[in-house]
């Protein structure tokens, strides 16, 4: 391969070796770019090519290394602001408006193509095409960062989809009006902000709690001394860097405005300051509000469902632990909420009309598919949207509830119509092949689509297997203790009085039984 690369005039390569006498892939390139392999197999090589302007490094290095004073957090914020201002000025002065450059190049190419053919015009057009591709790539990267759709890996250069996605995201992130409990609409920004503050202050006020004496003696220590020391260790620079480099490149940026890819790309310049800030937090135990503005702690939804079910079926006796008393108060407050309240993508309260309870999933999928921006997608874009977005929307609910068949069938129907008849939401359409064929894996001639009920059963089976295999986790421990799960659980009759989550888990036990088996160990718990 080295000889072939040199003969063709390339100086870089990525090679996937052949297995025996078949297969094998190679990618060769000439440009001095940074190439990172995203994924590869016998059929494809997916790479990310970054070719930053060499002047960009000097701009960032000079701005970042300016003398600033203060704590590690203050110094980092000042360096970020100085770098942001320097990049903004450099981009405006050197590159100007990206779309203006693209339109200018398109006009020049058109003029050359309309001129008389000649070697000079051919070389000129080739040069302009190379420059146009570079600016189109920059425009695509710009819009991709603006609308931050992580699922779209393939697409056209700066299409309507990018622009519409950015506009829609900005509108969704903006609150223009809210409706008060009295039914009045509030449109003033200051009044909206005050209404939110008053609402949460009213519902989540601090209450006096009388703690029993010696409350700390009710719980024995479960964390060993060596475990406690490990938890209190300050992370090493290698651990800090590894954690950051495992984050998605274009995940939502913080108040500084820089995405994760900035810190990855310029780690030799910014790495020391980032490490100092993280280390300062672990040694000092404090962090400015601006940096800590997005940390939220949530209770897992399965545990929430079990708590709600427990509070429904029995009353909490006086004298129990303070934490349970507080949870009972939270439940009393929750009962005043809307019956269709959603927590972590799942309904908090279920009625007897199960189809109505999960109709919100259909509405979310329908709004995503029938939106006007989805009509700008190509066939490849539609495939990606269905596989990575649409079929992921109901995942949260499907991972803990048994979704009614009518809802699952409607989700499959929406996906079929979107695939075959993109621009019409009703009426008949021609399907050139059965949906079952499209739901086959790509290795068997399908497109990898999945049926909703099969996804639901697979996710519930995962929970059932975690119960049967005695997975060591807080959530599984709570479920096994509440429902008295023993070794014969897979063969026992389902409980009648159980939460919706547990009923859903027991409903897929037969799937686990088909594939489960016993492995003989030391014989301590089995009769031979």
Image: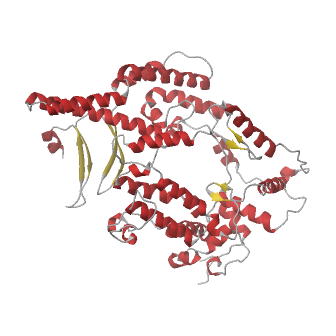
Above or below, 504 relative to 79: below
Left or right of 245 on screen, residue 491: right
Q: Residue furthest bottom?
A: 528
Q: Can residue 243 be seen?
A: no
x and y percentages locating residue 190 in the rendered image: 70, 32
Q: Quadrant of the C terminus?
A: bottom right
Which residue shows up at 44% across the image and 20% down it? 89
User: Eyeballing the image, is 524 above or below 446?
Assistant: below
- Residue at 55% x, 75% y is 512
Looking at the picture, does residue 387 appear above or below residue 510? above
Name the image quarter holding residue 424.
Answer: bottom left
The residue shown at (53%, 27%) is: 273
> 460 and 363: which one is in front?
363
Tag count in the figure? 0
The residue lying furthest to the top in this view is 67
Task: Pick the residue in front: 479 or 112.
Answer: 112
| Res 411 seen here | yes
């Amino acid at each position: 391969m080295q000889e072939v690369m040199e003969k063709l005039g390339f100086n870089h390569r990525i090679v996937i070796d052949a297995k025996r006498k078949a297969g094998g892939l190679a990618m060769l390139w000439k440009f001095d770019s940074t190439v990172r392999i995203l994924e590869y197999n016998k059929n494809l090589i997916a790479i990310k090519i970054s070719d930053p302007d060499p002047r960009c490094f000097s701009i960032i290095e000079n701005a970042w290394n300016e003398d600033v004073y203060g704590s590690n957090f203050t110094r980092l914020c000042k360096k970020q602001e100085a770098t942001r201002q320097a990049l903004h000025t450099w981009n405006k002065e050197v590159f100007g408006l990206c779309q203006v450059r693209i339109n200018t190049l398109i006009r020049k190419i058109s003029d050359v193509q309309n001129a008389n053919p000649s070697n000079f015009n051919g070389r000129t057009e080739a040069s302009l095409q190379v420059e146009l591709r570079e600016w189109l790539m920059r425009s695509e990267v710009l819009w991709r960062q603006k609308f931050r759709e992580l699922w779209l890996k393939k697409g056209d250069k700066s299409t309507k989809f990018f622009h519409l996605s950015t506009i829609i995201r900005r509108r969704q992130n903006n609150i223009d009006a809210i409706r008060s409990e009295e039914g009045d609409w509030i449109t003033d920004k200051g009044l909206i902000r005050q209404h939110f503050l008053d609402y949460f202050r009213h519902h989540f006020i601090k209450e006096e709690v009388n703690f029993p004496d010696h409350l700390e003696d009710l719980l024995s220590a479960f964390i060993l001394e060596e475990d406690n020391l490990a938890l209190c260790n300050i992370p090493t620079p290698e651990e800090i860097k590894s954690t950051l480099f495992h984050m998605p490149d274009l995940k939502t940026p913080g108040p500084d405005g820089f995405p994760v890819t900035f810190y990855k790309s310029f780690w030799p310049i910014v790495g020391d300051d980032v490490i100092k800030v993280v280390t300062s937090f672990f040694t000092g135990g404090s962090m400015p509000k601006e940096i800590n503005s997005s940390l939220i702690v949530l209770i897992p939804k399965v545990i929430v469902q079990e708590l709600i079910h427990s509070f429904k079926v029995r009353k909490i006796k006086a004298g129990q632990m303070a934490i349970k008393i507080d949870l009972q108060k939270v439940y009393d407050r929750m009962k005043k909420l809307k019956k269709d309240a959603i927590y972590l993508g799942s309904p908090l309260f279920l009625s007897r009309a199960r189809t109505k309870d999960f109709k919100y999933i259909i509405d979310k999928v329908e709004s995503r598919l029938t939106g006007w921006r989805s009509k700008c997608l190509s066939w490849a874009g539609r495939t990606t949207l269905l596989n990575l977005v649409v079929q992921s929307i109901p995942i949260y609910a499907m991972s803990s509830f048994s979704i009614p068949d009518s809802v699952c069938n409607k989700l499959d129907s929406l996906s079929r119509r979107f695939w075959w008849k993109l621009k019409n939401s009703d009426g008949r359409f021609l399907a050139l092949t059965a949906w079952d064929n499209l739901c086959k894996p790509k290795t068997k001639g399908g497109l990898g689509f999945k049926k909703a009920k099969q996804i639901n059963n697979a996710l519930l089976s995962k929970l059932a297997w975690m119960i049967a295999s005695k997975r060591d986790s807080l959530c599984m421990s709570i479920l096994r203790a509440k429902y008295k799960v023993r070794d014969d659980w897979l063969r026992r009759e389902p409980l009648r009085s159980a939460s919706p989550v547990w009923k859903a888990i027991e409903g897929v036990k037969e799937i686990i039984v088909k594939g489960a088996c016993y492995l003989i160990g030391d014989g301590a718990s089995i009769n031979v």
